[in-house]
């Protein structure tokens, strides 16, 4: 009887300690609450370095089901098309979410484009050189009917620029162990072009010019701390 009582007590203590440890390791502090308010639409200039807004081409719009999911994930979104003096057009899409917990993580282009009927026919990774360091980016080519759309995107988790996948999960874990729930941002640029290599050169130039045109505080939010800084 006494032996069973001791076992029950030990089991009870173990369960209590597990509950305490789980609670202690569950992040609860929102990193976004410690940051200055960020207005995405106001932060991104409508004109910079020869680029200006073009209303004739819109970035891929989500279907109603996808839009409902995006509304749960993101606090702010921005979608614009820019054109330069040579007629080159770049579609820019930025989404910011204050809660990058497991339930509300960034909605990646690989998912978004496929949901719109595109096929991802090419995928790779690279570094995008800017005047503020090198960004780890992912390159895609999405295709639907006659539309061929090379895509470059990067994400930030908290104050760190990273690629989607393992690096993203590692960054989320690091914040979680510190008791914080990070915010996150996804920046996507794309062009309609059958030549992916040429498209990526245009996109890289556009992204570098955009980052250079931003106010320092806004640039930090989009750039994080990329590799090479």
Image (tube, helix red, strand yellow):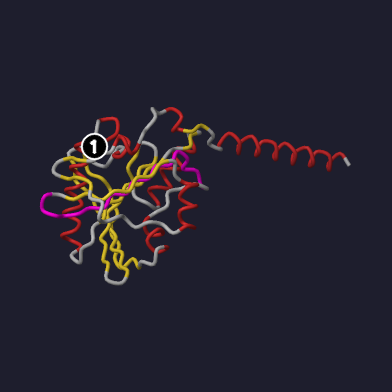
Farthest residue, direction front? 56
Mark 1 closeness class: few <14, some 14–19, many ≥20 residues within 10 Å: few
How far across and how far down the image is residue 2, in percent? 86, 39
Residue 48 position by quadrant: top left
From which residue to which does the magenta span run? 85-102
How far across and how far down the image is residue 98, in percent? 45, 38
How far across and how far down the image is residue 120, in percent? 33, 66
Q: Residue at x 34, y 39 (%)?
A: 160
Element on which disc 1 rests: loop
Question: Exactly how many numbered labels are in the figure?
Answer: 1
- Which image quarter holds the C terminus? top left
From what the image shows, is residue 158 above or below residue 201?
above
Q: Residue at x 44, y 44 (%)?
A: 74
- Which image quarter holds the N terminus? top right
From what the image shows, is residue 90 above or below residue 147?
above
Please state if 137 lies on the left or on the right of 87 as rendered: right
How far across and how far down the image is residue 206, in percent? 19, 47
Dot 1 corresponds to which residue? 229
Please state if 209 lies on the left or on the right of 71 as rendered: left
Residue 40 position by quadrant: top left
Residue 196 part of the magenta segment: no
Q: Residue at x 25, y 55 (%)?
A: 56
Between residues 85 and 4, which one lies in front from this camera angle?
A: 85
Between residues 33 and 40, which one lies in front from this camera angle?
A: 40
Between residues 17 and 153, which one lies in front from this camera angle?
A: 153
Q: Residue at x 20, y 40 (%)?
A: 47
Farthest residue, direction bottom? 145
Between residues 205 and 22, which one lies in front from this camera angle?
A: 205
């Amino acid at each position: 009887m006494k032996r069973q009582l001791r076992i029950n007590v030990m089991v009870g203590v173990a369960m209590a300690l597990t509950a305490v440890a789980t609670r202690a390791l569950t992040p609860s502090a929102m990193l976004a609450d410690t940051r200055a308010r960020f207005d995405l639409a106001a932060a991104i200039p409508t004109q910079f370095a020869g680029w200006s807004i073009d209303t004739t081409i819109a970035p891929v719009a989500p279907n109603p089901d996808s839009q409902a999911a995006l509304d749960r994930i993101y606090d702010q979104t921005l979608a614009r098309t820019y054109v330069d003096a040579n007629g080159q057009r770049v579609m820019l899409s930025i989404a910011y979410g204050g809660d990058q917990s497991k339930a509300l993580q960034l909605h990646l282009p690989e998912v978004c484009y496929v949901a719109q009927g595109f096929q991802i026919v090419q995928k790779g990774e690279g570094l995008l050189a800017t005047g503020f360091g090198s960004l780890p980016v992912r390159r895609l080519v999405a295709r639907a009917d006659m539309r061929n759309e090379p895509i470059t995107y990067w994400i930030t988790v908290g104050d760190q620029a990273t690629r989607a996948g393992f690096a993203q999960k590692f960054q989320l874990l690091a914040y979680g162990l510190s008791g914080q729930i990070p915010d996150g941002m996804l920046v996507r640029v794309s062009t309609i072009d059958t030549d992916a290599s040429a498209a990526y050169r245009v996109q890289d130039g556009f992204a570098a010019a955009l980052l250079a045109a931003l106010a320092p505080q806004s640039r930090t939010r989009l750039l994080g701390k990329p590799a090479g800084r």
